[in-house]
Image: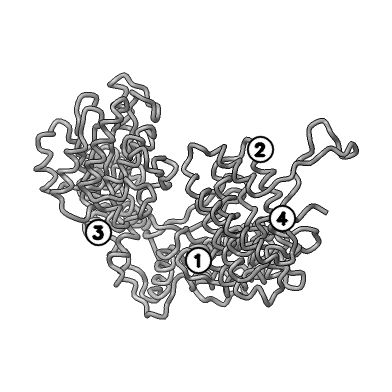
Amino acid sequence: MASERLWFILAGRESWVGKVHAHEIHFRAQEDSGHPFRMGQAGIPSDIEIFFWRLGTSFEKSVDGLLRSVLFEIINYAPEIVSGLLPETDPRNSWAYAPAGPLLGESTFAPLNRTSSGLLDLLKKAKALSTKYKFCLFIDGLDEIQGDITDLLKTLNELISSNVKICVSSRPWNEFEIEFRQCEKQTMYLHELTKPDIRKYVHEVLDIQRNPEAFGLVQDVVTKANGVFLWVDLVTRSLRNGHANGDSITELRRRLGELPADLDELYKYILDSIDPRYVKETKTYLWCALSSERSLPLLLFLFLSNLETDQFLAEHTNQLISTAKRRVNSRCKDLVSIKHSHMKSYSTLVVEFSHKSVSEFLYRHYGQIPFDKSFDPLVETMEASLAAIELLLDVSSATVEVYGISHFFLDLVAQADRSWKPQNSYLDRFCSVVLSSPSLLEKLGIDSIVCPLYEKQPSTTVFIEVAEKYRLVNCMRKRLETLPALGERSSSQLLQMFSSRNDCSPTQRTRTVDLDIFRHLLKQGTDPHEVLPGRTWSAWRHFIQASFWALSREARSRNVREWRIIVIKEFLLHGANPHIIVEGSRERGSSRNEGGHRTLLTISKMLDYIKLVDSNSGSSELIGEVEDIFTQKTEEWDRVRSGRGCRILPG
């Protein structure tokens, strides 16, 4: 690979080069070329891994997605080329405007929003500007692309250059074999290379005595597998069960002959082999697992079965786990596996699909697990989670399991919230349940963040803490609609919390969530000048005072400064006093007893400071907008003189 520009990998029926293969090839290539692997340094090869996925978004299975990904990665390694991709006058001429990844939809970084031909032209320009870098592209799953294969092949040839090598993989489709026939010396057949490993694996797993018939059985498995390890794993489980039942070699070979050679057919064979009495539960288990973004806790399956759960109270956790394992194994067989999930502070058993191809098969053949339209797997899973938490809170040996299911439940609520389906009723029930367990509240990190907001409604306090912690913006928006009935002071305290939370370099996600809730509170009529309960200042005054303190610290990032500009803008648009004056720090060398002078700070001084610090950044347009609003609101206040006073000074 040190001398060739293109490698082609054929992977039998399934195309899984994956990171392991990519890294092995990459390390060998760099050893041959004499280059150690060090990420992103000029002159040192850097790898870019791209995986097509037929069930993914349009970008994950298209030429556009490929081009956007490659362009993003090249810029990520060589950010200095951005200035050459955009006119210098463009305020977006900064990598700070790029998203966290190129496949997230429409990018705010203009070069990534182009047609295929435009992206290809830009990519050629990017390669020309980054000649001091060397890139190796690993592109997996060419056969999973959606679109014209001719366009894909043309694009791949365009990607190759003096500083870019590519390694592609695919199932053995005619189009690819014909296109890459000139690369015969650089073509690898993984299903041929893996035969010795498969043979060794089958020998070890089946533990069959060495005799001619046993060797014949092993060779039959190797031949029928055609290099697909997953198929081998599933088939050897069946053969191992037969061997444990005393089947002869002849019977095992007959069993092997009955098993389909195609993975999809094998999955269907497994589904069809499930006891008909369990089919309804199988559908529930698989559909709920498909619908969740996270692996389901093992004990949850006991509650998905709608069993009489009172008996669980008398059982030890180990007995519950054993029962759940037996039910999952009998209802789902080899389509799923039970594994340990190691979280930050606990380890628990979860159920996940044996391989991603299982979920792909179920999505493609959803007729295998049909449900009526009234069935909502997400709601079904939340119901089961709440039932599990309510019951297992009384089982002393199930503390870890309750903690894991609680985390899982909150992740489910967050998943629904991101889909604009806030589940406030379920979250309310959860908050009411966990109130009875202070230790669980503490473990979840929601012991007392915004207390004492609702002294008479503690479950509402927990609701807001959970919604804030898990970024449940739609749940919070829905709940805030009832805030006026709960008291003005409650909303003013929330106003302070969501305007000042981002002191530590906010991410785009937290900024979006907090700003949305903050705006909602203001639009609802929350008074920025309302004195906070137990304090002598308002949310507006607290924010300005804290802003001068935060901005005076050199460690504060541009993101923090930009966040505060946005919040000032929203405060001013919703009636905050633009004449506010707060006191800064005392002069150096003076103490409180000596009565040294304090600096009087205003909004205009803050904006001047931010302009000075960020003179070369892209914030000037935002600052100019806020200055215009500040001028307008100042004039309005001068005309109206609302009676709240022109200056708000510390008491």
Identify the residue at image location x=13%, y=34%: 183
Q: Nearer the viewer, residue 64 or 38?
A: 64
For the residues carrying marks 2 and 3, which lies nearer the camera in this image? 2
Q: Mark 4 falls on what kind of element?
A: helix
| Cα separation between marks 4 and 2 | 19 Å
User: Does the CB distance between marks 1 and 4 fall below 8 Å?
Assistant: no
- Indicate which disc, 1 or 4, sits on the residue closer to the N terminus: 1
| Cα separation between marks 4 and 3 | 73 Å
Apparent side of residue 638 relative to residue 404 in the rendered image (left or right):
right
Q: Which residue is mark 1?
A: 417
State the mark number for residue 259: 3
Color style of the picture: one colour
Can residue 178 be seen from the camera position used here?
yes
- Indicate which disc, 2 or 3, sits on the residue closer to the N terminus: 3
State the mark number for residue 553: 2
Kind of residue at disc 1: Asp
Kind of residue at disc 3: Leu
For the residues carrying marks 4 and 2, which lies nearer the camera in this image? 4
